[in-house]
Each structure stands twice: as C-alpha cells, then as structure tokens.
Image: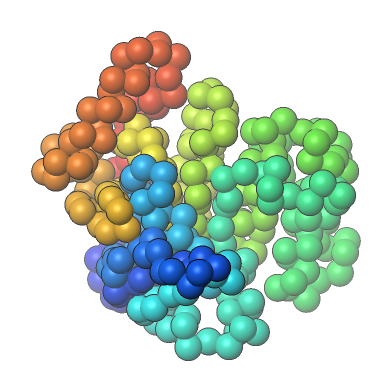
Amino acid sequence: MASLSSAGAPLLEVRGLKVAYRNRGRDELTAVSGVDFSIRQGEIVGVLGESGCGKTSIGLALLRCLPPAGDQTGKVLFQGRDLAALSDREMRNIRGAQLSMIFQDPALTLSPLMRVGDQITEVLRAHRVLDRKQCQSIVHALLEDLELGDLDRIYRSFPHQLSGGQCQRILIAQALVCKPALIIADEPTASLDARTALELIDLIRKINQRDGIAFLFVSHDPAVLRALAHTVIVMYAGRIVERGTADQILTHPSHPYTRALLAARQGDVCENEFAPAEIFSTLSSPEA
C-alpha cells in the first residue's frame, strides 16, 4: 500500500459531526451522533456497520450533499479548510476535483441518456480548462488504465450497454479523472458478483499504492475491509463504537457489537460456499 506518514496535519479531520433528518411532521431522526475521525494522505479508512447505522450519511455530509431534509453540524476540515464555511461555489470547485465519491449503484448515478465517455468528460470539463479533444484523450487513457478494453466502444456506450462491473468502473473513472486527494467509496462492491467485486478491490488497491489517493471506504462486509483498509471504524446506531487498525478490529475486536457483527458474517460464509467474503479472505491484508 501507499506509504503512510503520521507527520503533519491530517488530510481530513472530522470533529463532532452530527447528521439529522426531519420528516413532514418535523420530527427529527438522528443518523450520525457526533462522530470524530481523521484520514491521512494515502490512507484507506474503512467504515464498517449494518444498513442504517449512518455510514452513507457521513459520506454525503463530507461532500455537503445531504438531501433537503438533512442537516449537519460539526466541523469537517479538508486540507486545513473548514468545508462548512465555504460558499456553494467554493464547495463545487472542491467536489469532484479534490474530494470525490463513488456511489453504490451505477443505475441510479449514471444518466441513461448520455454516453459514458461524455459523462466522465463532463466532470473533467467542469474543473479543468481543456478543449473537447484534450478531454477525450485524458478519458481514453483513464479507461485504458482501468482495464476496460475496447476503449472506443466503451467510450461511446450508454450505461445499459455495459455490464455492472464496467459501469462501476465508469463511476471510478468519474471519481478519478481530476486526480482528487480523497475518494469516498459508498459500498461500491455491494451489487457486484464476488469475482467482479474482487477485481474492483484489486483496482482500488492499485490506485492507492500508485497514486497515494486516500479512501474512505464504506462497507457492511468485514472481509472487504480486511483486504483493503489500513484503519477501520465500526459504527452502530450513528456512533463510532470501535476503531483501530484493520487487523486489530477484524481479528481481535473488543466491542460486543463488533464481535457479533463478525460472528454473523462468518455464519453467512459457512452457509454459502460462494460467499464473497470467502474469496476476499484469500487476499493478504494491506501493509500499514
């Protein structure tokens, strides 16, 4: 993995982040309850927890992309800048260029009416002063780097003409095209078959090793984080209940919830010999 250094300020520092949603009756539902964590340059931090624990809300809050019913408080310092203090225009300049997100479901993220190459190009043109030919050249090189093959066909394809794994790589290309410092990955392997998910994990590891891009990788699967993360934080009911190195958390958990979560996952693997976790377990843990 990329070399990590504890010197200097963190790339991202989150202090007392709270996310709440209001329904039509104005009742408040707290999704994230005052969490604190940091990410160093080149570090992969895994966020482990069940659905509804607040994992996705954290990612959306970091990007200031919560839905209208959502509200956030607390500090989010990215490269030393308080994101909450930035104007909408300043935030748009950061979002996609320095801080990006890979969403879980390409079907809900990619436009069905645009060719995928143009969708990647639009991200690049929003943040760089380049003509169309220059953008296309950069995008073609990125698609080749992501091992998509048959570049011209892929570039001209609409999302429905590609496989799920190919569409997920298009989302990765959108997140990567401006070479950000940090990428938030919201369960990008959840809808993929085990083999394709494994290929995606290997791809993210390669990107991290080669380019030093940091990741906040959200997952409900401990085996995925064991194969990928340097550090793991465990969430339950909107709170962080345990944190540590991936080896500490996933091999010697101390919190009862973490132990129960790992035990439940091991039971799932025993019942299904083709479970993704079994395949991921063949990978060695990343070096810190």
Q: Residue furthest front?
A: 25
Q: In screen coordinates, is 169 left or right of 118?
A: left
> Where does residue 5 sit, x and y in percent of width and height?
28, 63
Q: Nearer the viewer, residue 64 or 136?
A: 64
The vertical placement of 192 against 101, above or below, is above
Q: Which color scheme is applied?
A: rainbow
Whether residue 110 appears in this view of the structure is: yes
Q: Does 25 sit left or right of 75 as displayed?
A: right
Q: Residue furthest left?
A: 254
The residue shown at (37%, 65%) is: 30
Residue 140 appears left or right of 268: right
Q: Residue 91: give x, y in percent of width and height.
A: 58, 79
- Closer to the camera, 110 or 81? 110
Q: Is residue 61 in sight in this rendering?
A: no
**Against 187, is 45 above or below?**
below
Residue at 67% in and 44% down: 106
Q: Quadrant of residue 151?
A: top right
Q: List x then y, in percent, for residue 166.
A: 69, 36
Q: Please provide percent x and percent y for residue 204.
A: 50, 44
The residue located at (59%, 71%) in the rendering is: 68
Q: How many marks?
A: 0
Question: Which residue shows up at 46% across the image and 55% down it?
Answer: 56
In the displayed structure, 280 sits above or below 285; it is above
